[in-house]
Amino acid sequence: MIKAILIFSNQGKPWLSKFYQPYSEDTQQQIIGETFHLVSKRDENVCNFLEGGLLIGRSDNKLIYRHYATLYFVFYVDSSESELGIFDLIQVFVETLDKCFENVCELDLIFHVDKVHNILVEMVMGGMVLETNMNEIVTQIDTQNKLEKSEADSQLSTCLHPQGGQSLKCEQCRKEYI
Amino acid sequence: MALKMVKGSIDRMFDKNLQDLVRGIRNHKEDEAKYISQCIDEIKQELKQDNIAVKANAVCKLTYLQMLGYDISWAAFNIIEVMSASKFTFKRIGYLAASQSFHEGTDVIMLTTNQIRKDLSSPSQYDTGVALTGLSCFVTPDLARDLANDIMTLMSHTKPYIRKKAVLIMYKVFLKYPESLRPAFPRLKEKLEDPDPGVQSAAVNVICELARRNPKNYLSLAPLFFKLMTSSTNNWVLIKIIKLFGALTPLEPRLGKKLIEPLTNLIHSTSAMSLLYECVNTVIAVLISLSSGMPNHSASIQLCVQKLRILIEDSDQNLKYLGLLAMSKILKTHPKSVQSHKDLILQCLDDKDESIRLRALDLLYGMVSKKNLMEIVKKLMTHVDKAEGTTYRDELLTKIIDICSQSNYQHITNFEWYISILVELTRLEGTRHGHLIAAQMLDVAIRVKAIRKFAVSQMSTLLDNAHLVASSTQRNGICEVLYAAAWICGEFSEHLQEPQHTLEAMLRPKVTTLPGHIQAVYVQNVVKLYASILQQKEQAADMEEAQAVTQLMVDRLPQFVQSADLEVQERASCILQLVKHVQKLQAKAVPVAEEVSALFAGELNPVAPKAQKKVPVPEGLDLDAWINEPLSDSESEDEKPKAMFHEEEQRQAKHRLPEVDEEELARRREARKQEQANNPFYIKSSPSPQKRYQDTPGVEHIPVVQIDLSVPLKVPGLPLSDQYVRLEEERRHRQRLEKDKRRKKRRDKEKKGKRRHSSLPTESDEDIAPAQQVDIVTEEMPENALPSDEDDKDPNDPYRALDIDLDKPLADSEKLPVQKHRNAENAKSPEKEDVPVVEKKSKKPKKKEKKHKEKEREKEKKKEKERKGEDLDFWLSTTPPPAPVPSTDTLSANTNTDAAPKDELEEPRREAQDGEDQDQDQEKKPSKHKKKHKKEREERPKDKKRSRKKLPGSEEAPGEPVQNGALEEGPLPPMSSYSLLAENSYIKMTYGVQGSLQDSQVTVSIILENRSSSVLKSMELSVLDSLNTRMARPEGSSVHDGVPVPFQLPPGVSNEAQFVFTVQSIVMAQKLKGTLSFIAKDDEGATHEKLDFKLHFSCSSYLTTTPCYSDAFAKLLESGDLSMSSIRVDGISMSFQNLLTKICFHHHFSVVERVDSCASMYSRSVQGHHVCLLVKRGENSVSVDGKCSDATLLSNVLEEMKATLATC
């Protein structure tokens, strides 16, 4: 099982946090802080596995992380997951982000945490690995985005044929016309 | 209203969206909190509006704030509102917010049930998907209970996207609602063979997760997983399965034996490091589970160690880390194989990566020997000096102590060296492990008598320099060693060189700043020291000096009397009075030393924590007997009973009193022992007389080696342990020279002895005799002190509830032999079960129905268990993996017929185990076994009763080479007995036919799959009966009536219905025309639809898999009243085993006997025709000779078989 997935910056700012076990907001922040503390002091060329932090980790738990330029991707997992498997999964995650955002950069993640969540949801569900095939993930994301877009379009079309000229009705209209 | 909407829209223009919020927060770095609280106020306003888009935007922002640590539980209801939006865009936002912030304590969560149910059955797969994903994060026991059925249905959804999510979420449902596990399990198991790799992987995932917690319940799945392992190419799935096997093997060593070879092959063939690593891990687990007396597995160990060495040597730190991790697992059972890689592991100690160093440290424990202990510890000591973080340093410290003290200081040859190491460790600042060092010092000083002198000198130095130890601000840690130092100096004061000096050191004012418990020990031991000085002085008739010492005591003790610590105060006051009394006596020139020393007379021996328990109760002593008669009160009460309750009270009074006392006593005893056991400083000062007599001989007879005099005993100042390394070398060299002569003569003898004595021997370990001897009082555990497993388990462990026996048979009373159900079960051997057993008429079935279904399910499971139980033993005892297929068919068909076969079912199991035993025998003494086996075969025809009980498979077992078939055979393609019946845009029908031995009936199972977005209801199946074949209809209906399908089909759902047909003649294949009529209802309205089909009854479908025994088979063939026919098919590439499996599966045969590429098979028709086959495999062809009581049936069956084989 995956216990938690975190993305944070080199400064420890969280850009995404997903906990698969219930923790209070305070504990979540503590875990993020502690994880950052553990991970950030490690050199570049050391191993990517850490025996868990005090909070989330009992003896069973491991912390597997990857460091990309300005970002840390951290997975907390228990012993049922393969260390190298999760290590690869992080890479799949990042490559998927890269595909979905078209050359992903930190700012994409900062401003579109909801989209990152939507991508993550197609990979990991309730702490278990759902899909590891990047193409499959990207296909599903694309279809869902299209669905969202068609919903927005239909809303737009009702706006284009307004009754009483309420063309300011929706977000999309505002973006189009103002 | 309109105005309000316009107003709302205008307001929205100025709303922030998520990006604005993030940007805003970034721009307000100075007053972030203030800015956010402003935003939250805005969000609260937005949530009050009616516009769902506004609300969704607000919730989206809240989700972001939640990540920053803001509690958003107050918006839970708004989140639910957004979840229930009709648009996917908003729904997704709502579910995301819920999954981030809802938990079991969220009270509004119960409002979501219906919404989620609606979303789950939504025609849009993404609505369903989003609901499943959200639910996986916040499912509660209530939700799990209410939605389990819906999710279970989704497991058979047409879209793999939904199926895989539904399968995965079932794990969460099981966790929250364990009752759902049994009903859902069959379907989950089915999904292991789902055509979609994603669904398959999800099912593997869930079962692995379940099995990890309660492996024993999943052993029966081992054959299935084995098949998956040998056929799957998906590394993710393979890793999970291999990990699962790692958890299963400890429970079933035979499984391990079976696994070794395929795993070894994988290790050799895979290029994926992750897979390789997991394989190695599981092989290690297998090796651990196998008994050590298996020499042929040393190759596997070597392979693992070799591969791990490659990992450790890799420049990739991750591989290095994992290699070390796995190595430590091998170390536990095969230390020798690891020890040869000592160089590598020592090298890792110098790695710059702390994780790697820690892993290497773990391994060191098993690396040390008498020979290299000093060298390794020396290395660790330099690390201690260099270590930066206290955590790593503390880890080093504990490891050093662990390594040195392991198995009663087995590897220490020179205790002076060890004491100096301990003393050196006291220089560590800020360590948390002062008490560990102290405990070691005490232990060594007490157990190693020869070292006391040295220890005392070291400890006195330590006491003298107490200011160094105690001066640091973190007094809590290292000053613990002063406790040990004070005690050792006091207790063994006769060894002190300058007792007076030490006494002064212990009475310094600075001491009062130490923690109370240490001061207390100081005070107590000051008196011991004082007593011994007094004696010395008096013996030397130096009365003045003696009085001076007393004066010193009288002067200094008051500082302890003032201590705030009660213990210190009490001891100090007592002792002060004593010393003052001594002073008075001294003034009168009375010799007092003798009497003062008498206070501390006697030797303290180490006593095992549980020793007290072993004290035998003296004869004639009844510990339970009353010492005094019980109080007269109760007696008088008993004597004057109050009418009605007389009897009861009396009985209670008599029984309860002693019982309570016993319990109480036991409790106290236990508590005290616990305390003693936990207290490293606890030393029993006066063991009971018996105890002492028992122990003394044991202690005394140990020859105490005198300290080599060449070792300087007095080391000025704090010594350096390093010098001992050199000295030790010299000592050993001398020893070697001395021994050389003696040893040549009796080398052989010694070699024998070696193995017995030491658990971790190294080549020349025995050559090194320790300089000092350790007294180990044998710490025998009393028989009743078994560690109970229950204690280890956390009662709150959520996984405990899932410890459900999935194969558990049900009580007899629960079996309800109803004709229809029997048929239903009959049709559902696991291989054919594409569709759930449980039929769902409506979402909420009535209670009665539910109960009934439950029973049906459980019954189903019982059958499964019987099959599985057989399967597992059978599978484990024989080789070919596909074998379970025929045997399951066999048994499932059999269980229904009558009670008699049951006995037979019991027998094969034993046989199978016998087979297994034989296998083992065979490994040990193959030649003998062969003979035995031959003999057995000859005997068989004579001994009918015995051989009758053999299952066909168990016979074939010994005839085959051990443990290979599985690997040589290619993977078997998935087989299904279901074929397409008819389809249109609304519905797809697939069907399978299964014969039953009763009343020449066949059951047709039809899977109806709704492909449309409408709900299909009022389905009715009408068939045009032929003269030969008729459909069984409900009583009272005419031949032209249809039979209703007992369920409706929501969009995307499939279900299975069964129809029984009666057949007159079965020798020919039959075709029946029929029509399915139904009503398709969607939002626009309902339409009547029809679908025509043709049911094809092949001759094979009239055959039922029936086991047959070789002797009965032979009789049949000999009887001569069977007609014969044969076919031959060329161009066959499939392996023989798979071929047989195919015949078994499609034509319902069972293998009677198989010898090499020739097999005899048997089946029986629903009307009792015997069909016997002899299948022979040629180069590229297969020939089948058949004998049957009906010629037409035989030729038809063979024709059908020809068609099947032609596709192989």
Image (cartoon, rainbow, N blue to C red):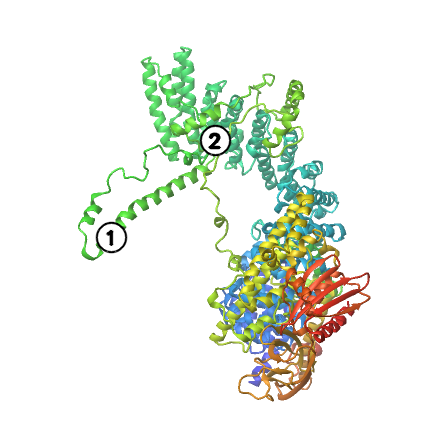
Q: Amino acid at mark 1?
A: Glu
The residue carrying mark 2 is: B483
Instruction: Say if residue A137 shows up in the picture.
Output: no
Residue B353, relative to residue B1202: is it above or below?
A: above
CA gap between label 1 and label 2 equals: 55 Å
The residue that appears at 54% across and 59% down in the rendered structure is: A23
Q: Position of residue B1109 (x, y in %)?
A: 64, 61
Quadrant location, the C terminus of chain B: bottom right
Q: Position of residue B1207 (x, y in %)?
A: 77, 69
Residue nearest the observer in this picture, B531 or B191: B191
Residue nearest the observer in this picture, B1193 or A92: B1193
Disc 1 is attached to a residue of which chain?
B
Q: Amino acid at mark 2?
A: Tyr
Q: Position of residue B33 (x, y in %)?
A: 57, 61
Residue nearest the observer in this picture, A86 or B668: B668
Nearer the observer: mark 1 or 2; the answer is: 1
Instruction: Say if residue B238 shows up in the picture.
Output: yes
Asked whether the residues under marks 1 and 2 belong to the same chain, the reply is yes
**Which SS class for mark 1?**
helix
The residue carrying mark 1 is: B649
Badge 1: few (under 14), some or many (20 or more) residues near its Cα, within 10 Å?
some
Location of residue B218 (image quadrant): bottom right
Quadrant location, the N terminus of chain B: bottom right
